[in-house]
Amino acid sequence: MKKRICYLFVFNGYADWEAAYTVAHLNKYSDFMIRTFSIDGHPVTSMGDIRIEPDHSLADVDPKKIDLLFLPGGEAWENGGNQEIALLVEAFIRANKTVAAICGATVMLGDHGFLDRVPHTSNDLAYLKDLAPAYNGDAYYQQEPCVTSDHIITANGAAALEMMVAIFKKFNVLEDSVTEAVYDLFKSAGMENKLFAEAGA
């Protein structure tokens, strides 16, 4: 029986691939239940033109009952959209729950001060400073694909796999060696298996 819950925020134009590795493998390998929500609970269409009918609306989300909030990227963040999510992020952090933000979603975190005093990353420091005018976390910025800090995990838009690994390690989903093996498999496009087969291993 599923014991933990991950809520994936979906909105028109959200980058569907950025959450794909994480939610699929959490569903497969862990006791996480995956649920989706949009701001008003109405259907949305992803950047890949996939229509999603969310399980819930923003008003339904109770941080005390949820273990992980996943915020995928998308141009809406860069254009000042989805600001309603800021209060939810604050509630998650106060409840000592984990927020994972990738690509454009880091803009909202930066603009609302959530990254000012914790190690973090994004698509680039200049990207954050340009799109999040209130951002003051320069000293804590790390030029890494993915950074975990207390209850906030951030990643750049090309680090969907690294985000999956960080979340798996945060929640002890699998042994670290197994997690790394899954990462290596997808990162290498299975080339190791092909080479082993050709070598007769």
Image (tube, rainbow, N blue to C red):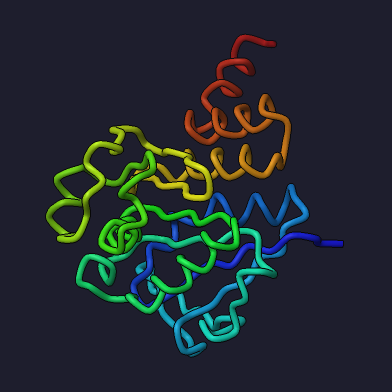
Q: How many marks?
A: 0
Residue 20, compared with residue 53, is above or below; it is above
Q: Quadrant of residue 193?
A: top right
**In the image shown, does 27 or 105 lie closer to the viewer?**
105
Q: Quadrant of residue 56?
A: bottom right
Q: Quadrant of residue 86?
A: bottom left
Whole-percent x, y for residue 109 in the image: 34, 59
Whole-percent x, y for residue 82 in the image: 34, 76
**In the image shown, does 198 or 32 lie closer to the viewer?**
32
Whole-percent x, y for residue 149 in the image: 47, 41
- Residue shown at the point (64%, 33%) measured from the top left: 179
- Residue shown at the point (31%, 65%) measured from the top left: 74
Residue 3, compared with residue 65, is above or below; it is above
- Residue shown at the point (48%, 40%) measured from the top left: 148
**In the image shown, does 182 or 6 lie closer to the viewer?**
6
Residue 20 lies left or right of residue 34; in this view the side is left
Whole-percent x, y for residue 177 in the image: 67, 24
Assign the N terminus to one quadrant of the image.
bottom right
Assign the C terminus to one quadrant of the image.
top right
- Residue shown at the point (54%, 62%) measured from the top left: 94
Residue 143 lies left or right of residue 39; in this view the side is left
Residue 21, compared with residue 143, is above or below; it is below
